[in-house]
Image (cartoon, grey):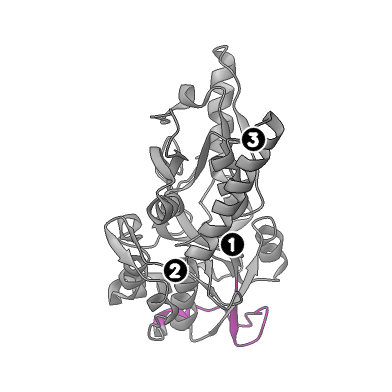
C-alpha cells in the first residue's frame, strides 16, 4: 500500500471513530469517577425551590436580557458531562445546564439557555446579551477585571493521550517539550501551557505546538490520527471520553489555577449586582442537597465545593 493511500485510510478510520464517539454518547451509560451516569435518565431536570434571601438581593430596576428569565450562555458543544445535546440534537443537557437551572429556580426566574461558542460569552455577558455564563469558566486575575464570579466547582485539568501512545506522564513543564497538544484558545489551559513553554524555552528545550480544533469530533480525529500527541482540558471531559471508548487514557493532572488551586464559576458582568444573589442561590442549593444531586448524576462529585465564593484568588493571582 502506498504512503498516501495508507495515510488516507488512517484518516478515514480516525474520522469514523470521531463520529462514532459522538453517536455513541446515547448508545450506552458511562462510569466516570466511580459513578454510573445515564444520559437518558439525566434528561429529567433537577429543580430547586425559590430562595427568598437570594431573590431579595436582586438589585432594584434589574434589567434582564429577557424579562422574567435568566438568560445564560452555555457552551454549544458535545462535551459531556459538562454539555451534551440530547438525542433531538436541539436540547442542551449537562452539568452546566443543571447548575444554571438551580440558579434560575432559586431566583424565581425561568431559565433561558443560549448555546454559544467560547469566544462569544465574554462580549455577550459584558454587553448584556446574556445575564450570565455557565461554561466551565475558571476564575482568573485578568477576567476579574471585567467580570464577577460565584464559584460552583473545583477546576481540575487532565492530559489525555491515545491509549497506544508511548507517553506515560505529562505533569510539569519539561514534559510538554516538543509535543503537539490539543488545547482551547483563550482558556486557562492554554495560559498554563504557554507559561510552561516559556520556562522550557529559557532552558533551551523544544517548544510545544498548540493544536486548536473546532469541536469534540475534530479533537478525537486529531488525537487518533496522530496529528496531536495529547489533549489538555477539563478532567471530567477527558475521563468521560476515556470511559466511553477506551481509546484514550490519563497521563497527568494539573490544578486549573496552576500552581495554585482554582475554581469554576458562574460569570456575570462586573458591578451588575447579580453576583451576590447568584452566590446566595448556589449556597442554598448546596445546603438543600440539590447541588450534590447535580454533580453526582454527572460523575462530578469529586469536584464539588463546600460553599460558593465571590471572586476568589485564581489563575494569575
Q: Quadrant of residue 290?
A: bottom left
Label 3: which secondary element = helix
**Residue 9 percent coordinates (x, y):** 63, 42
User: Which label is found at residue 6?
Assistant: 3
Along the viewing direction, whichever of 282 and 249 lies nearer the viewer:
249
Residue pictured at 29% horizontal, 73% vertical: 287
> Residue 22: within the magenta?
no
Identify the residue position indicated by label 1 in the image.
77
Q: In this view of the protein, can residue 135 be seen by the observer?
A: no
Q: Earlier in the sequence, mark 3 or mark 1?
A: 3
Mark 1–mark 2 Cα distance, whole angstroms, equals: 18 Å
Q: Which range is magenta? A: 53-72
Residues under numbered marks 3 and 1 in contact, where contact means CB atoms less than 8 Å apart: no
Identify the residue position indicated by label 2 in the image.
27
Residue pictured at 58% horizontal, 15% vertical: 202
Q: Earlier in the sequence, mark 1 or mark 2?
A: 2
**Residue 72 percent coordinates (x, y):** 59, 72
Q: Earlier in the sequence, mark 3 or mark 2?
A: 3
Q: In this view of the protein, can residue 47 be seen by the observer?
A: yes
Screen quadrant of the N terminus: top right
Amino acid at each position: 500500500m502506498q504512503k498516501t493511500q495508507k495515510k488516507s485510510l488512517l484518516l478515514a478510520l480516525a474520522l469514523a471513530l470521531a463520529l462514532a464517539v459522538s453517536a455513541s454518547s446515547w448508545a450506552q451509560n458511562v462510569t466516570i469517577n466511580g459513578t454510573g451516569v445515564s444520559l437518558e435518565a439525566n434528561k429529567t431536570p433537577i429543580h430547586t425551590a425559590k430562595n427568598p434571601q437570594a431573590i431579595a438581593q436582586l438589585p432594584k430596576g434589574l434589567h434582564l436580557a429577557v424579562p422574567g428569565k435568566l438568560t445564560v450562555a452555555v457552551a454549544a458543544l458535545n462535551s459531556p458531562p459538562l454539555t451534551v445535546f440530547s438525542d433531538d440534537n436541539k436540547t442542551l443537557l449537562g452539568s452546566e445546564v443543571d447548575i444554571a437551572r438551580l440558579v434560575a429556580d432559586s431566583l424565581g426566574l425561568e431559565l433561558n439557555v443560549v448555546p454559544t461558542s467560547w469566544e462569544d460569552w465574554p462580549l455577550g455577558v459584558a454587553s448584556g446579551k446574556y445575564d450570565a455564563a455557565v461554561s466551565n469558566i475558571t476564575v482568573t486575575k485578568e477576567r476579574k477585571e471585567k467580570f464577577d464570579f460565584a464559584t460552583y466547582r473545583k477546576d481540575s485539568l487532565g492530559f489525555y493521550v491515545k491509549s497506544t501512545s508511548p507517553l506515560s506522564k505529562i505533569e510539569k513543564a519539561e514534559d510538554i517539550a516538543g509535543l503537539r497538544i490539543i488545547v482551547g484558545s483563550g482558556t486557562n489551559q492554554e495560559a498554563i501551557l504557554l507559561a510552561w513553554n516559556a520556562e522550557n524555552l529559557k532552558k533551551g528545550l523544544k517548544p510545544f505546538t498548540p493544536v486548536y480544533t473546532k469541536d469534540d469530533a475534530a479533537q478525537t480525529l486529531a488525537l487518533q490520527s496522530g496529528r496531536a500527541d495529547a489533549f489538555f482540558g477539563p478532567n471530567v471531559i477527558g475521563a468521560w471520553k476515556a470511559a466511553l471508548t477506551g481509546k484514550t487514557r490519563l497521563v497527568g493532572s494539573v490544578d486549573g489555577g496552576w500552581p495554585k488551586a482554582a475554581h469554576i464559576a458562574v460569570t456575570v458582568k462586573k458591578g451588575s449586582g447579580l453576583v451576590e444573589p447568584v452566590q446566595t442561590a448556589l449556597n442554598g442549593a448546596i445546603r438543600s442537597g440539590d447541588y450534590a444531586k447535580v454533580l453526582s448524576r454527572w460523575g462530578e462529585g469529586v469536584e464539588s465545593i463546600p460553599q460558593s465564593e465571590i471572586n476568589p484568588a485564581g489563575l494569575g493571582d
